[in-house]
Image (cartoon, helix red, strand yellow):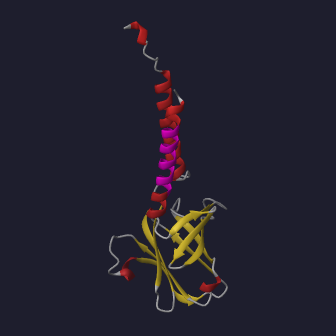
Amino acid sequence: MVLKYIRPALLSLALTVGLSFTAQVQAHGGLSLADDMCKLTVGPYMMHFTGYQPNSSKEKEFCEDIPVTGRTVVALDYIEDALRPLPTEVRVIRDTGSEDDIESITILHMPAKVYSNGSINFEHNFKEAGKFVGLVTVGKDGEHVSRFPFSVGEGTSSMPSGLVMAMVAALSLGGFFLFRVGKKPKDSSAA
C-alpha cells in the first residue's frame, strides 16, 4: 500500500529540486554554479567567477549575491584560451530598471583591454546594500555580453535556495507519508 505513494513522491521531490535550480540559474543571468565552480557565460565563452569579502568572511567564496556590504574582491579567470587575445570590459551598475544613462548608474568600470594572462581581478567597496547588475563584454566590437543581476547585503541565506527547496519538499513529503500511513484502513466487514 505504501509503495504506490513512493513513485509520485519521488517524482514530486525531483521536480521541486530541479525547478528550484532552474529558477536560480535564470535569476542570475549568465552566472551559474556547475561542478562546484561558478561559471560566467559570455556568448560562446566561459569564465570562472570567484568573489571574496576578506574583511567579513575571510576565505569564504561566493558566486552570486554578495553577503554583506563592504570590501569585495572579484576574480574572473578565463576557462577558454580563445578569450586571451580578445578585449574584455567589466562594468557594475546599480539596477534601476533602465540602462539609458549607463554612466550615471555605473559604480565600477574597467574599460575594454586584452588580459593575455587570462585573469581579471578587481576590488570594490560596496557602501550600500541594494540590487546591482554585472556586465562583462567581450570581443573587438563588444559582440558578446553577459548580464547578471545580483544583490549586496540583502539578507542572503548562507544556504543555497535549491537546498532550502529540497528541505521543504522533504518535510512536506514526510508529513504526507505520516498522514497517509497513519490513517487506519476502513474495515469493509463492518458494514
Question: Extreme top residue here?
Answer: 190
Is there any visible trace of residue 131 in the rendered image? yes
Q: Main secondary structure of the magenta part?
A: helix
Residue 72 percent coordinates (x, y): 57, 68
Residue drawn at (37%, 81%) of the image: 102
Give above or below for 9 relative to 120. Answer: above
Along the viewing direction, whichever of 190 and 14 lies nearer the viewer: 190
Residue 61 percent coordinates (x, y): 62, 62
Along the viewing direction, whichever of 34 and 68 lies nearer the viewer: 34
Residue 28 percent coordinates (x, y): 47, 65
Magenta segment range? 7-21
Is there any visible trace of residue 129 in the rendered image? no
Is residue 15 one of those drawn in magenta? Answer: yes
Along the viewing direction, whichever of 46 and 73 lies nearer the viewer: 46
Residue drawn at (49%, 62%) of the image: 25
Along the viewing direction, whichever of 150 and 24 lies nearer the viewer: 24
Position of the C terminus, as image quadrant, is: top left
